[in-house]
Image (cartoon, rainbow, N blue to C red):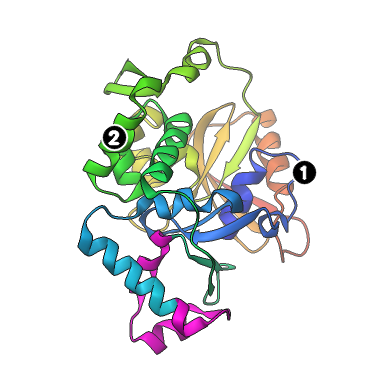
Amino acid sequence: MPRAALLSIHARVEGTRPSTWEDPSLVQVWGPRFSVYVVPARDHALFTLARMPEDDRGRQRAEDMAARIDGFLRGRRTTDNEVAAELGVHNALRYAAVTGTVLIRWEGARAPLVWTVPRPEIDPRAARRELARRYLHVFGPTTPQVFARWAGIGDAEARGAFDALSRTLTAVRTPIGDAWILSRDEPGFREPPGPPAAARLLPSGDAYYLLQGADRELLVPDAGRRAELWTSRVWPGAVLVEGEIVGTWRRAKAALSIQSWRQLSHAERDAVEAEAHSLPLPGVEGQITVHWEG
């Protein structure tokens, strides 16, 4: 969601403002697994066209939907509800996203606006290869199978992307099995980690813990705590202290509640509260109040 994207940026970039997600260098798309993503405008093909199906049926379904949307809009912007009603479809609108010709604007509440743009001038396989490279850089060590699940593409397409990158990859062994990293990232894996931030409040779905299967066990060894973080419904945010997930958080307007998994020192609590007060939340009047639970 846009506001979650804003907080993800804030956790990594100094000077983030409530309007940062609206910067013209960013756009919104129905990205991997048709979730809403805020991505660099110049790279939106990597999160859309890269997921174009290889099979004729899937590709034709996407192309047909994109053509129908473009024919109805004719350069206009309107809500996805209006487009869906006119075309007699619902979520099937999102199939058009993989053509790279559909952008959206969603503020997290009302129906998103939809419009069409020219098709990106990049081959889908080249876009998929670049998406895989970036995934390896951010999430590696990883495997084609894990990349396929994240991107919402077929295993064959994911293996093809990794095969195309084979000369730039290094095989590694991890506590949960064999995997791959980008060869140029190897020095960074061998270097000792730098000092972690005192505290960060990561939003629901942040890339830091957007993990599946055994990867989750590495990040949060305790099964009970994993169930609290990766719930069956909307995930809470993750509380990070000195590089360790120590609890979860949720927010209702200006009230932020934190469920701590261990006893935090006064300095650690102060760091978390300072981070909470710095959150660039649009539309929130007054200072954030923090309520501790546990």
Badge 1 element: loop
**Image x and y of residue 213, in percent:** 28, 37
Residue 263 placement, left or right of 61: right
Q: Is residue 108 magenta?
A: no
Circle nearer the N terminus (1, 2): 1
**Image x and y of residue 286, in percent:** 78, 61
In front of the other: 28 or 52: 52
Residue 286 placement, left or right of 211: right
**Marks 1 and 2, how far apart at CA:** 36 Å
- The crowding category of the residue bearing disc 1, from other C-alpha atoms within 10 Å (few below 14, some 14 to 19, many at least 20), is few
In front of the other: 149 or 121: 121
Which residue is tagged 2? 144
Does any portion of residue 37 appear in the rendered image? yes
**Magenta span:** 70-99
Q: Amino acid at mark 2?
A: Pro
Which residue is tagged 1? 15
Q: Looking at the rendering, which quadrant does residue 57 occupy?
A: bottom left
